[in-house]
Amino acid sequence: MMQKNEGSLLSRLQNPAGLKILNASELNLLAAEIREIIVSTVSENGGHLASNLGVVELTIALHRVFNSPEDKIVWDVGHQCYAHKLLTGRYGVFPLLRKAGGLAGFPRRSESPHDCFNTGHASTSISAALGLLAGERLRGGRARTVAVIGDGALTGGLAYEAFSHAGQLGLPLIVILNDNKMSISANVGGLSKYLSRLSMKSKYQLFRRHFDAMAKKIPFIGDVFFDLVVRLKRAVKAVFYTDNFFVDLGFEYVGPIDGHHIQTLIGILEDVRRLDRPVVIHVITRKGKGYSFAEDDPGAYHGVGSFSVSGGLALSGAEGREPAVPAAGSSFTDVFGAALLDAARKDERVIAVTAAMDKGTGLSAFRQEFPKRFFDVGIAEEHAVTFAAGLAAKGLRPVTAIYSTFIQRSVDQIIHDVGLQNLPVTFALDHAGFVTADGETHQGLFDISLFRAVPNMTILAPAGAAELRRMLDWALGARERDGEAGPVMIRYPKALCPAEPPALSLPLEKGRGVWLSGGCEEGRLCLAFAGGLYREALDAARRLEAEGITADLYNLRFLKPVDEDYLADIMNRYAAVAFMEEGIQSGGFGEYAAELAQRRHCRSALAVFAAKGGDLGTREELLRENRLDGEGLVSRLLVFSESPAACRAL
Ligand SMILES: Cc1ncc(C[n+]2csc(CCOP(=O)(O)OP(=O)(O)O)c2C)c(N)n1
């Protein structure tokens, strides 16, 4: 698919070198064209609208001044890279943004030499850029390296580790701090307040404005004199510096600068390009710039599904907003949010912790009703976990709601601070499984493998709303009555809850699942699935029925711990057992079950159907690609039931 607007400036730019010959008004026109394309494409494909609209001028200025791909630009999170993609030869394929087989919504080294580092998770840019720059210097090169990081991403600890190291190395790393006062929601934390104070305190703009006005008043030679003096001043001391946190770490600081004024940005970047020391350029932008709906409510337009350009989300429905009381067909996120609220009303020890994802994890209503028992720690998943461990050690019952992909950050905290101390922290892992459109960095496929290994950890996977409520209730109290303690993880997909059979409402029995059909029947086929795959397992069972094969459905519920006697009994009685999970195969539940079967010399034939991986596409497409949808499961199960040995090779 190609873009139609062939007369546009953008359509004529084959690569960023074309930018170098455009005049000021053409650059402004280009910015307008880029905005229009971003709005229209995202309105159809969904994507990170507001963040991208905020960096259009900055991206143009960067590509005007630096020579990508020799000079490197690392985009933190990478969700704001659309203008960069449009300016680096991907205009023609932009309609395929976030589509299977199309353009990723994040930088991809495999997609273009201009994408010098893959991103998706926050706060990595300064570390990566510093590594690229140190590598460049070690190899004798002189190319420049720029990290573009948002004020939200700056709440992540990794950024400070990198600042500290960069200050020590003293290499001429250029860090652009894109300050729009927003993470997904309004930014939080002391640093965010500090940046605001810095913006007000800094005299740079004031100085520039007075100086510009004064110099331009000098007759005849005004402009020439102005240019000359500014250049001289810049050459001597580059720009006007202010003492602050970044300076103390060994960086020069320039700013704050209007991030929507292309010529100002170009001027500063050209100066800074010549510096031989690390520098932070503090750029102020407006999230959602140029599209009034997004400017008015940048949080709602951070990540959107398709919407109407003229009517905004009001006509189309936003992603990630949750009602306090979920309606029929609610998402797992909605159900979790409402269940947690109920639990908090009954037990004042219940506390909610999020890492910059209050809406995404369904906690908005909680935040409103219990502001003192709600903590948004910023994009700081490691801290969120250890902070929750502290709360738990003080006798509280924290629930830390984090997407599966982002909790990867916290492996050590979960082992060291929670698991080893056996503290009652509950983890609500949203987006566990395949994730629509955000690509490989956002797939929630590793949690089962990573956290099954953690001492004292319980991992639960609900198949639907009632079961999710049961599990949360169990995690937060019911198990205490049975003398159980320790951490619990509840993992569920980004999906709507299916219609549920009554069995899903049955109380939990530690280590055991629940039968949805059959129940330890001799000689039959058993489909043993982890919660999120209920719909697919049911579909497979129905299709098998049509082929004359009866399969019993066993919902595992507990991915850890497991009542091994009970599971081994299943793996003896059934002719064949197929384990199914929406998680990576290596180290997953199925591999554990196979090991148990071997240890206990179980007789059933076994198959493990798990994820191999996932990239762009919808959750449904990715399930199909991994042959974990009803049809894919059945095609494998048919081979399996005829010849279990052949199935192992599938
Ligand atoms: C480790 C991690 N946690 C959470 C997220 C989800 N996330 C994506 S963008 C974002 C906010 C980023 O804010 P900022 O860096 O200020 O960029 P802006 O969108 O405001 O331009 C968050 C929390 C993530 N990408 N990575």
Image (cartoon, grey):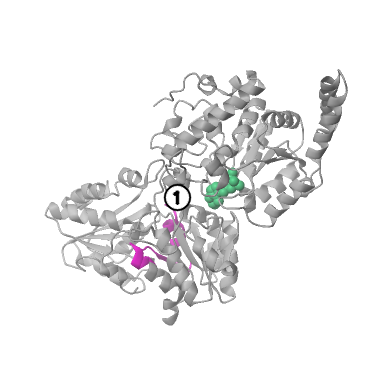
In this view of the protein, which residue sits in the foreground, 210 or 587? 210
Q: Identify the residue under disc 1.
A: 319
Kind of residue sitting beneath label 1: Glu
Q: Residue 461, located in which quarter of the rendered image?
A: bottom left
Residue 197 visible in the shown view: yes
Q: Position of residue 609 (x, y in %)?
A: 30, 52
In this view of the protein, which residue sits in the foreground, 51 or 599? 51
Residue 457 visible in the shown view: no
**Residue 156 part of the magenta segment:** no
Check disc 1: other Cα within 10 Å, few if <14, some if 14-19, many if 20+.
some
**Residue 451 part of the magenta segment:** yes
Q: Position of residue 650 (x, y in %)?
A: 27, 46
Q: Is residue 283 left or right of residue 372?
A: right
In this view of the protein, which residue sits in the foreground, 218 or 402? 218
Q: Residue reaching furthest right?
A: 218
Kindly state the secondary structure of the residue where label 1 is placed: loop
Q: Is residue 206 left or right of residue 114?
A: right
Q: Residue reaching furthest left?
A: 548
On screen, residue 206 above or below 573: above
Q: Position of residue 536 (x, y in %)?
A: 27, 53
Q: Please count the marks in the image.
A: 1
Residue at left offset 48%, top offset 38%: 105
Q: Which residues are magenta?
A: 444-468
On screen, residue 342 above or below 114: below
In this view of the protein, which residue sits in the foreground, 596 or 463? 463
On screen, residue 95 above or below 416: above
Residue at left offset 49%, top offset 31%: 37
Q: Quadrant of the N terminus?
A: top left
Q: Is mark 1 within 8 Å of ligand 1?
A: no
Q: Position of residue 152 (x, y in %)?
A: 61, 49
